[in-house]
Amino acid sequence: MSHHVPAGLPEKIRHYIDGKYVDSIDGATFEVLDPVSNETYVLAAAGKAKDIDAAVASARTAFTEGPWPRMKNRERAKILNAIADQVASRDQELAELETFDTGLPITQALGQAQRAAENFRFFADLIVAQRDDTYQVPGTQLNYVHRKPVGVAGLITPWNTPFMLESWKLAPALASGCTVVLKPAEFTPLSASLWPGIFEAAGLPKGVFNLVNGLGEEAGDALVKHPQVPLISFTGETTTGQIIFGNSAKNLKGLSMELGGKSPAIVFADANLDAAIDSTLFGVFSLNGERCTAGSRILVERSIYDEFVERYAERASQIVVGDPHDKATEVGALVHPEHYAKVMSYVELGKTEGRLVAGGGRPEHLPVGNYVAPTVFADVPKTARIFQEEIFGPVVCITPFDSEEEALDLANSVKYGLAAYLWTNDLERAHNFAHSIEAGMVWLNSHNVRDLRTPFGGVKASGLGQEGGYRSLDFYSEQQAVHISLGPVHTARFGAAGTK
Ligand code: NAD
């Protein structure tokens, strides 16, 4: 099979601290593989505590002395729009690098690059429209909210859609006037190496953005524990989130946690079945199934169950798996051999826990690379590990239900609560069921289509806090209350009784 290697790959991936590309202080590096050949294509600088110290010092100086936190919102918005223009003008290059590094199909990587640009435009608009509250007590007091950026924000991101998820944190952090240290995922550092050039071209002042590559347990850990980083925005696995929670306690950091998921798609018999099948296929097999909001448990009403399973399995087995750079590819290669081994172990487990109706292993025509055939298990009980645990690959469980109560019980019987997708044409049921689902986000008769103003986040083990719209800006801002008296204030005169 041909192996597409993009032109202009860097010779080495370095950190970017205080406006300069630098190696790790101790010179350490780690190997980065591409998921089609599984060969090392580049070395990346492996940051440790001292590199994080340097990056935080740069961000701290830019925060306390530099122009960025003091600029008018309109001025910051102009730079954010210039960043969006830069990203949009380089979308093809970005998509190509992202596809090479992650194994995501090129058409989907291009969509993610365009969304990254949109994230900057959205937060540029939002800060210009920003307003804060004033409270009057007539004749007595005027109180207002003075909003200011918190300080140096630590941003820690996963590998599934690296550049887009970095933009989802960078845009609101920068819009709010924070300075940042970004620690991208070690499996996929390539696209993040474009940020410095994009920011320089857009005119972001030096030191506002700092990038440290490295392992989570080293660079990520040092960022989480750094006393001069008051905020951590983290997206990744629930277990990593729990470690970060613990490590942030000593410094009482602000935390935003976007964690794992095992989201249900519930299909009632009255739903538009054609649309539900299209949508639930896309909902779990897009982005190679490496998608936090994947609808990876499909619950189907018994009366349409057999038809649904048959049609779904037939379509899943026809999904085009192949070279991520080929525009016809629908499912590419999983990010890394370690992750591939994890997903394959669930595929094997699934054969003992459910009825395999599509996929079930490596596609025959792809002997090399991290390829998994879209895999569908039917009749999966709720006690099964493949029903309960996040697989984060192209693997889905289908389970029948007989009543609304049973569907709700199945939907809510996992530790996660990120997204849910509900398919029904009964208006009353749609709303009542949506309100009862333990999920941060519910889509009715749709897969995940985002409106950036709405809250994004999970409940239970899927996260803490919500991003999206003003909620993101609130996370990166202090809202200081300033109280002004409009006349003499009644004051009890302590200690005045004995004086004349
Ligand atoms: P991960 O938790 O392994 O790694 C995420 C990041 O954390 C990486 O940059 C890693 O280096 C860093 N890290 C690891 N250990 C650390 C530590 N001890 N201290 C500080 N940083 C540390 O996650 P992943 O495998 O890269 O990503 C997949 C996971 O992300 C899935 O569970 C998925 O559901 C989740 N995810 C969630 C959302 C969401 O919005 N809820 C979005 C995308 C992905």
Image: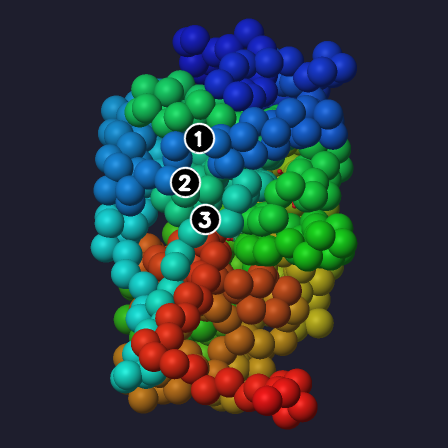
Q: Position of residue 203 (x, y in %)?
A: 32, 24
Dot 2 or dot 3: first in sequence order is 2
| Residue with the most extreme bottom position | 497
Residue 117: quarter of image = top left
- Residue 244 place in picture, x, y as percent: 70, 50
What separation in Å lies between label 1 and label 3 (alpha carbons)? 13 Å
* Residue 422 in sight here: yes
- Measure the C-alpha gap from mark 2 to mark 3: 7 Å
Question: Of the residues shown, which amino acid type is indicated by label 1?
Answer: Gly
Relative to 132, 462 lies left or right: right
Q: Quadrant of ligand 1?
A: top right
- Look at the picture and state if 331 lies above or below 423: above
Give the left or right position of residue 418, taking residue 427 as reference.
Answer: right
**Mark 2: few, some, or many residues within 10 Å (few <14, many ≥20)?**
many
Q: Is the residue under label 3 in contact with that under label 1 (CB below 8 Å)? A: no
- In the image, 85 versus 279, the foreground residue is 85
Q: Secondary structure at mark 3?
A: strand
Q: Residue type at mark 3: give it.
A: Pro
Mark number, residue 149: 3
Residue placed most toward the observer, 185 or 359: 185
The yes-or-no answer for disc 2 within 8 Å of ligand 1 is: no
Quadrant of the image for the C terminus? bottom right
Q: Which residue is mark 2?
A: 69
Q: Nearer the viewer, mark 1 or mark 3?
A: 1
Residue at 45% across, 54% down: 477
Q: From what the image shows, is residue 155 above or below residue 137?
A: above
**Mark pair 2, 1: CA separation:** 7 Å
Residue 362 figure quarter: top right
Q: Which residue is mark 1?
A: 66
Residue 20, image x, y percentages: 52, 15
